[in-house]
Image: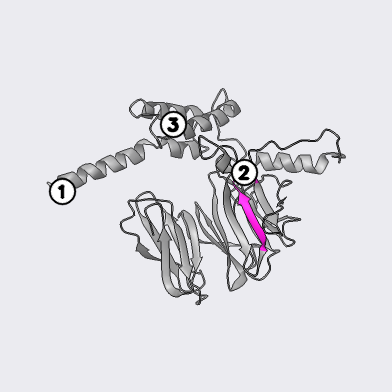
Amino acid sequence: MKKVLLIIISFLFYSNMYSQKFRAMMKDQNVNVYDVVNEAENYFKTHDKNKKGSGWKPYQRWLYENESKYYPSGNRKNTDPNVGIKSFLNFKNNVVSRNTTTTNTWQELGPFRIDTLSGKPTAGIGRVIDFYVDPNDNNYIYISSRSGGLFKTTDEGVNWLPKTDYLFSCGVNNFDVSPTNREEILISVNNSGNEYSNGIYKSTDGGDTWSTTAFDPLNVALGLGNDFSVRKVKYHPQNDNIVFVGTNHGLYRSTDKLASFTNIVDNVDVTAIAFHPTDPNVIYFYEKTIAKNKIYISNNQGLTFTLSNEIPGNNNEIKGILSVSPSCPDCVYYSSKNGV
């Protein structure tokens, strides 16, 4: 009886997983828009589109964004995924400089505080996705927003300055600051609509100016239209020449602050990276998978990784965070919505 029940549960789980294959088709540029539509519409004939997490709303947003681009054929194969950044660079290189001074000023109307709003918790204020506080100076803080970019304060949050308004894409889904120089920053610039990467940029003057790294959308398989997302950018805390980049296509490692890089682990979705507090050779990363929660470990500064263990009792929750603590150097903490 237990065996039969296990088979039924497994069947239902994998049936649901694969029946939503329209989600994977949405991200595949080789699949025609209208093939995605047919797959999705057939799926929602037998599934409640109003149920939370059904996938109906993301599908509708995707359709709204893409159908007009590829109408009437629906063919996405011949579309350059970097058409956006190329058009931006062409405009930037050829546009005539203009005086931006104007007497027709704008006035910000808010909302300014989340506790003054009613209704949905995301009522238009925006989302802080990552932050940094200088451990030696609480006045010096960076925060990033999924769609608003990177902001900086030097007076503990009294005043904020935007630092990415003139980049090709202003969404910054994660960033890291050099452990030896708070003015040196690496930011992952992304399209907030689909979280596809537009590359990693570097600043050595606290965000006043930016330069592209080797993780440039024109150098590697990144850019709008490609299913490539940068999940984490991390300096090695004891050697800031070494940088790790976790993506949905693998883990990358650089020994020259992203002037170049190598793919260390392929075909894994790396969403979290952590470093042993006292041993510079030990590094961990978390692989986001549908059915299992896996942590990998390196004992040679990230040259190779092996599977450390799977996390039991997490009910296959795919979103998780890794953390370490100097008070227990050999401990690794994992947290998700199911607990720690």
Say if mark 2 contacts mark 3, CB within 8 Å: no
* Residue 212 colored in magenta in the image: no
Say if mark 1 contacts mark 2, CB within 8 Å: no
Residue 200 numbered mark, or none: none
Pick the front one: 175 or 257: 175
Residue bearing the label numbered 3: 56
The residue type indicated by label 1 comes to Lys
Q: Spot the residue most to the front.
A: 116
> Do we see residue 74 in this rendering?
yes
The residue type indicated by label 3 comes to Trp
Residue bearing the label numbered 1: 3
> Do we see residue 214 in this rendering?
no
x then y, percent, for residue 77? 55, 35
Residue 147 numbered mark, or none: 2
| Secondary structure of residue under mark 2 | loop
> What segment carries the magenta color?
139-148
Pick the front one: 276 or 248: 276
How busy is the neighbourhood of tag 2: few (under 14 within 10 Å), some, or many (20 plus)?
Answer: many
